Every structure is written in structure tokens, then in C-alpha cells.
């Protein structure tokens, strides 16, 4: 499932879609809130730093475990220093600087690739317990 | 081109002979059913397997396993046998039958049948070999199917029991209006920690609690991820408008909390459960007085 | 999505009714801060029972509301945060430090009443 992101209300739409998918997958309500919150953070980063991009949601399986995968992709300016962006409290937009490190804490898997000048792709997964 | 055709033909021929040998084998086992089944049941009792079951029960199960065994040999499909193994396990596990007993009886049957094949074909060594070629892989697969079925069933039961124990392991007790107590006993692993958080936060909402006393006197130690989780639970409870008082922190756990950099000023901790309840009552505005005192005061 | 704001006695009650965009949140913040001065409210309750996500931006905005209203001499209490939402917030690293929280509207009102009484006692003591 793809959700295009280019304004505020898309952020809300993306997290609602994520919540529905997590519910279909049989996640307990705590995990539904966790997944929705992570999507919210990733989608907001797209609006704030890249202007437009998309959130791709899908169900995944690994060794009999079921989970939900969220990919946030944009072709914006990219992150000059990924290590710095992953630190708590670091923000270039005047926010709380918890978006990326907080998302990593929320989810089980976290991968980020960013090409300066070409865009950013963040992939996160949450597994059912 | 012609070479590969040859190979195909040879393979085809081999498959056909394997099939015809299996047919012969199945006919033999059907013919000898009464005798072999009895022999097997006798060996089971002699080997002191399935001691939790009566002779009649063993014979009845031996009959079903035997028939399912022969059917699996005949059809080459194992679903029916698998289903039977699961069903059997479900019945015998509560009676204390162990894994080695189940593996033992299938191997015994394998031997009983093999011996009967030896007895029948010992005069034609080549034929015996060919029959065994067909028999052995199928017999091994049957043994594996039954044993794995038993172990899977056991694991399922253990998982269910763990689930039940976990639910019982974090009781949420309401001692007064707006006051909950969670006495935690035993090691907190990550899964139990998650459950504890959910029960505590849900308990606050359903009981409209304002104060929660989390007593961890019975927890021997915690590692840093679980310590972090506890701190987060305390913070989440505050977001719901409730205060958590942690009591019974052992020196070891206090050390762990300090090591992970918990601001103990933000955590409400009291030495023991009684002190925790007193503190909770104070927060709720209760005052406990002796009956005599209160009579004296009102007089 | 507009958030209705109700005046009840000396208090303002804002009841969030559905998911809010960042723009909605900013508008709620500005309106509340403006209204507090206009009606000389003593306390503000923001009821977030309907929110199934409170992310970093929402938390920051709620915290800003509480701080700005305190600077105007009134108290703020956030009520109705759902258990699973609270859990996600602390995982993310958000604790709404320095902001009062209560279980629901009723508790929030009781909290503001207690605060008002304490304030009165203090004022009387100084006279």
C-alpha cells in the first residue's frame, strides 16, 4: 500500500492506514499505536525536509513471524550527517529532535540510507509477539 | 538427447519397482497384522514404555498406530498419520507420557516390522535387500513424523501454560478506591515486562486509580533493558494522571537503576510495601487513626 | 478540524474530537492562549481522549500550550491520554515534563479546583 505524502493531512492519512493494516495483521492495540506513531514521525520528516515523498506499508513474514514494514522514501535534499540525525535532541527544524532516534526506539528494525542531494529512505519493521 | 531419455526411463522404472515392492510390503503387513501388532504391544510392555497406560489402552493405541503406519506406507502421504500423532499426543501428554517413550515405541514397531521382513525373505537375500530399500526410508519418515508431532504438541501445551502463568504473574489488586497494588514476584523477562506495563496502564484506566504501588520485593534482579522499561512504565502512568510508588527495591536493582542513569529524584520510591501503602494513602488524602484515638478526639 | 472550546466558570475546556494535523494543533494552541487572556480564565483543560496518536509535534505543541498559559497566570491540565498512546509517547522519548495530566475531564476539573484553592490560601496568607 502506497500513501503519497506532500502535506500535513497526508501525515494523518498515512498513520490511519498504518493503524488499519496493523489491526488486520492482528497486532494488539499497544502495537497499533506504536506503528501509527512511527509512521507519523517518518511522514512528518518527509513534509518538513523533502516536501514530498511516499510511505509504503506492507505485511512481512520472517521465520513464521508476522510483522508490518513501513518504508518512508523521498527524493529530497538528503541528510548530510546521518549519525548526527540519529542523536536524541538534534534537530535542524527547531523540533524536539526525537523523530528518527525515537522511531528507532519504537520499532524492532530500523534501516536508513541517505544520499546527500538525492533523497532519503527509511525502512522500519515491527514484529508481532 | 537420447541419453537423458534413458535416464528418464531408468528413473521411471525404478519408481515403478519401488512402488510394486511397497505394495508387496503392505500386503505382507496386512496379512500379519494380528500377530505383529500383538508382538509390538508385548515389546512395549517389556521395555516398560507407556507405563502410565493400561495394557488394554496400549493395545488399542497400538492397533491404531499400526493401521495408520501401514496406510502411510501404502499411500506415501503422511497427513493422516500426522493428525493421528497429534491427537494421540494430546491424549497422552496430560497422563505424563514422555518424549523418549513415544520415540521408543515407534522405533520398536520399526524393528518388529523389519524382523518380520527378515523372517519372510531370508531365503532370497536380493529380494530382502530390495524390500528393505523401499521400507527403510518410509519407516524412518514415519518415525520422524510421529516423534515430531509429539514434540510439537508438547511445545504447544507448554506455550499455553506459559501464557496462563504470565497472566497470573502480574495481579492488579485494588486495596482502596483509587489505589492499586501490583506485587511482582520472580524474574521479569522482556515479555513479562511488556505484560506488566499493559496490565498496569489498563488497570489505572479501568479502576480510575490515582496511585499505584509497584512492589518488587520478590524480584531478585533486573537487567538494564527491563529497568528502562520499568522507568518508562512509571512515566506512562504519570501521563494517565497516576502516581507510581516503587517499593522493595533491592540494593542490586537500585544499582542497576543508577547505572542506566535513572533520575531517582523523578521516581517515587519507598523502602517497603507497608511504607508504600502509607505514602499512597497520604497522597490520596486518607488519614489512618486508631479507633480509640478517634473516639477520644470527637469526645 | 476545529477543536470546540467551551467556557465553564473560570475554566476553558477544549475537547479534541478527531485526529489533528500539525496546522490544527497550532491553531488550537493560538486560540487557547488568546482565549485565556480574553475571558480571564483560571484554568484550561485539553481533553485528548479521542487521539489515537500523540507524536513529537503534538507533544511539543501541548507542552507549549501549558507553558504559554502558565506565563499568563493560568493552569493547564491534559486529560484522557489513552494507555497505548502513553506507552508510545514514552518509547519515543516524550514525557510532557512539567505539564499536569489527569485521567479524565472529571479528574482534570478536580485538579484545577485544588490548584485554585491552594492559590486562594496563598493569597489570603499574604494579606
Image: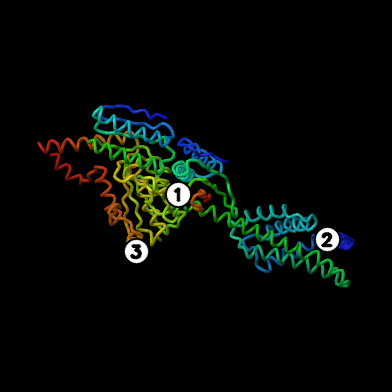
What is the x, y in percent for residue B268?
29, 52
**Chain under label 1?**
A
Q: Position of residue B108 (x, y in %)?
A: 71, 66
In the picture of the structure, the residue carrying the numbered disc 1 is A103
Label of residue B22 in the image? 2
Indicate which disc, 2 or 3, sits on the residue closer to the N terminus: 2
Which chain's residue wears label 2? Answer: B
Q: Which mark is residue B27?
A: none
Residue found farthest to the front? A117
Task: Say if residue A109 shows up in the picture.
Answer: no
Residue under the point 33% across and 47% down: B212
* SS assignment at label 3: helix
Disc 1 secondary structure class: helix
Marks 1 and 3: CB-CB under 8 Å? no
Q: Dot 3 surroundings within 10 Å: few (below 14), some, or many (20 or more)?
A: few
Q: Residue at x 29, y 54 (%)?
A: B269
**Residue at the extreme left of the image, as rendered:** C127
Residue on which the image places disc 3: B252
Q: Mark 1 or mark 3, which is nearer to you?
A: 1
| Vertical side of C69 occupied by A104: above or below | below
Q: Residues at marks 2 and 3, common chain? A: yes
Amino acid at each position: 500500500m502506497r500513501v503519497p505524502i506532500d502535506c500535513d493531512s497526508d501525515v494523518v492519512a498515512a498513520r490511519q492506514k498504518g493503524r488499519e493494516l496493523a489491526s488486520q495483521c492482528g497486532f494488539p492495540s499497544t502495537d497499533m499505536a506504536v506503528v501509527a506513531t512511527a509512521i507519523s514521525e517518518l511522514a512528518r520528516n518527509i513534509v518538513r525536509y523533502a516536501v514530498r515523498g511516499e510511505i509504503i506499508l506492507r505485511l512481512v513474514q520472517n521465520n513464521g513471524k508476522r510483522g508490518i514494514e513501513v518504508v518512508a522514501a523521498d527524493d529530497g535534499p538528503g541528510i548530510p550527517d546521518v549519525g548526527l540525525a540519529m542523536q536524541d535532541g538534534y534537530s535542524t527544524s527547531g523540533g524536539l529532535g526525537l523523530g528518527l532516534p525515537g522511531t528507532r526506539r519504537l520499532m524492532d528494525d530500523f534501516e536508513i540510507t541517505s544520499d546527500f542531494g538525492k533523497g532519503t529512505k527509511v525502512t522500519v519493521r515491527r514484529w508481532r509477539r | 538427447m537420447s541419453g537423458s531419455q534413458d535416464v528418464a526411463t531408468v528413473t521411471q522404472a525404478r519408481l515403478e519397482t519401488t512402488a510394486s515392492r511397497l505394495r508387496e510390503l503392505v500386503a505382507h503387513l496386512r496379512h500379519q497384522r494380528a500377530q505383529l501388532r500383538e508382538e509390538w504391544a508385548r515389546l512395549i510392555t517389556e521395555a516398560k514404555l507407556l507405563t502410565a497406560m493400561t495394557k488394554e489402552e496400549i493395545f488399542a493405541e497400538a492397533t491404531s498406530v499400526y493401521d495408520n503406519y501401514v496406510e502411510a506406507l501404502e499411500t506415501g502421504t503422511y497427513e493422516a498419520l500426522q493428525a493421528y500423532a497429534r491427537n494421540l499426543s494430546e491424549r497422552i501428554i496430560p497422563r505424563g507420557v514422555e518424549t523418549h517413550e513415544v520415540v521408543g515405541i515407534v522405533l520398536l514397531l520399526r524393528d518388529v516390522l523389519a524382523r518380520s521382513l527378515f523372517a519372510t525373505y531370508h531365503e532370497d537375500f536380493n529380494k530382502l535387500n530390495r524390500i528393505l530399500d523401499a521400507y527403510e526410508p518410509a519407516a524412518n519418515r514415519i518415525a520422524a513424523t510421529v516423534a515430531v508431532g509429539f514434540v510439537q504438541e508438547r511445545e504447544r501445551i507448554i506455550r499455553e501454560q506459559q501464557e496462563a502463568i504470565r497472566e497470573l504473574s502480574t495481579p492488579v489488586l485494588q486495596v482502596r478506591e483509587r489505589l492499586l497494588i501490583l506485587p511482582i514476584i520472580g524474574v521479569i523477562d522482556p515479555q513479562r515486562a511488556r505484560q506488566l506495563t499493559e496490565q498496569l496502564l489498563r488497570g489505572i484506566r479501568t479502576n480510575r486509580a490515582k496511585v499505584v504501588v509497584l512492589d518488587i520485593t520478590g524480584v531478585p534482579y533486573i537487567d538494564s533493558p527491563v529497568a528502562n522499561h520499568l522507568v518508562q512504565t512509571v512515566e506512562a502512568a504519570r501521563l494517565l494522571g497516576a502516581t507510581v510508588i516503587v517499593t522493595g527495591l533491592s540494593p542490586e536493582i537500585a544499582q542497576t537503576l543508577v547505572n542506566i542513569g535513572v533520575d531517582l529524584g523523578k521516581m517515587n520510591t519507598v523502602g517497603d510495601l507497608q511504607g508504600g501503602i502509607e505514602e499512597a494513602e497520604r497522597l490520596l488524602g486518607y488519614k489512618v487513626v486508631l479507633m480509640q484515638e478517634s473516639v477520644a478526639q470527637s469526645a | 478540524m476545529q477543536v470546540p472550546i467551551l467556557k465553564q466558570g473560570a475554566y476553558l475546556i477544549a475537547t479534541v474530537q478527531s485526529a489533528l494535523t500539525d496546522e490544527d494543533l497550532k491553531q488550537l494552541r493560538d486560540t487557547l492562549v488568546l482565549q485565556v487572556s480574553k475571558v480571564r480564565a483560571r484554568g484550561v483543560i485539553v481533553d485528548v481522549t479521542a487521539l489515537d496518536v500523540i507524536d513529537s509535534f503534538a507533544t511539543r505543541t501541548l507542552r507549549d500550550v501549558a507553558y504559554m498559559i502558565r506565563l499568563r497566570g493560568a493552569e493547564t491540565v491534559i486529560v484522557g491520554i489513552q494507555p497505548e498512546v502513553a506507552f508510545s509517547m514514552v518509547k519515543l522519548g516524550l514525557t510532557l515534563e512539567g505539564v499536569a495530566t489527569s485521567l479524565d475531564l472529571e479528574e482534570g476539573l478536580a485538579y484545577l479546583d485544588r490548584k485554585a484553592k491552594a492559590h486562594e490560601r496563598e493569597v489570603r496568607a499574604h494579606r
